Image (cartoon, rainbow, N blue to C red):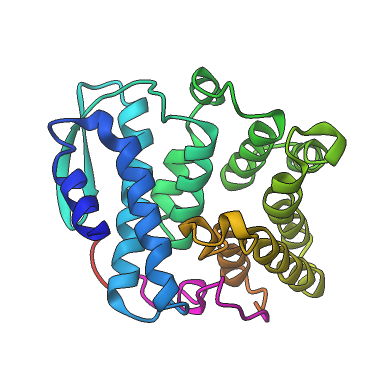
Amino acid sequence: MLQENALELIDGLEERSTRLGDAQRLTLTLAQSRCLLDPRGAIFPTWDAWVNAMQVGSAVFAAATTSEERVQCRIAHKDRTLHATGPQWYVTPGAWISAFYLAVVCRERDRITALCQVPLSLLRENGERFEGYHYAWIETLQTYWLGGQDLVPKLVAAVHGTEPESVADPETVGKLLYPPTEMFHRFIRKDNAGFNRALANALQWHKEYWTEESRAFQASGFVALAPLAIACMAHDAGIPVEVESDYLPATLVGRNWCGEFPT
């Protein structure tokens, strides 16, 4: 049923492109749910679901930033012509971060570059419920990918922004949002041992957060998306990813499915 609903939403995007926000949430839920029964990401339907989620996430920002009336996006094995949407309620820092992580996991360099050219001003238009560290983290990732200046000060700002006394929800920030910044810090320093320690810690905190009774059945907990994305970056840069976990699909880290079909 989840897959049928996702494909129905996708098929309707050319008529109602403002359903992209709903499609982004649903396709990501489907991708994560696939890993409940396939934690290594070893079978094709799992990879297909991750690619669909990545394509929808990228399309959200392609449609929001285009200066044309329409933009062509490949989603679910078809080239689809979407209407320009401009800023929408779902064009937020959280949506950008998810789209970035998915593009990294799927090794979509052109899509990553396009996402990194999305202006922070666009994200701020519907970003009232997001805090400063979200923007600092986005700026860090954009600067890294585009080879900009002042990467380290921007990362420091992102890390400091997640300090417990600085945030409204210290548990979520401490267990889910701080860990990828520490992993990234170890990654850019080429600290292999430190990176794997940070990854192990990130997965442990992820488990603690998502196995709490009120959250135990939410699809967001099935895969540690942020640690997975940073682990993919590290793997591609030659850092051995030595940690194994059901929250970290090994086939996605190892990019085994990349190039299997046009994306």
Q: Quadrant of residue 168?
A: top right
- At x 32%, y 39%, the residue is 22
The residue most toward the right is 165
Identify which residue is drawn at 45% across, 46% down: 99
Whole-percent x, y for residue 18 in the image: 27, 29
Furthest residue in direction front, as rendered: 213
Q: Position of residue 74 (x, y in %)?
A: 22, 49
Q: Nearer the viewer, residue 238 or 226?
A: 226
- Check the picture and name the quadrant holding the C terminus: bottom left
The one of 143 and 98 positioned closer to us in this rendering:
98
Q: Residue at x 25, y 25 (%)?
A: 84
In magenta stretch: residue 228: no
Query: Image check: 80 left or right of 168?
Result: left
Residue extent of the magenta highlight: 242-258
Residue beneath the point at 41% across and 30% down = 90
In this rendering, does residue 226 appear at all? no
| Relative image position of residue 30 (x, y in whole percent) | 35, 59
Task: Using the rendered view, name the quadrant where residue 11 is placed.
Answer: top left
Please tell me whether residue 33 is drawn above or below residue 118 in the rendered image: below
Residue 247 percent location from the top left of the image: 56, 71
In the picture, measured across the screen, residue 120 lies left or right of residue 203, that is left
Q: Nearer the viewer, residue 189 or 169?
A: 169
Prevailing secondary structure of the magenta residues: loop
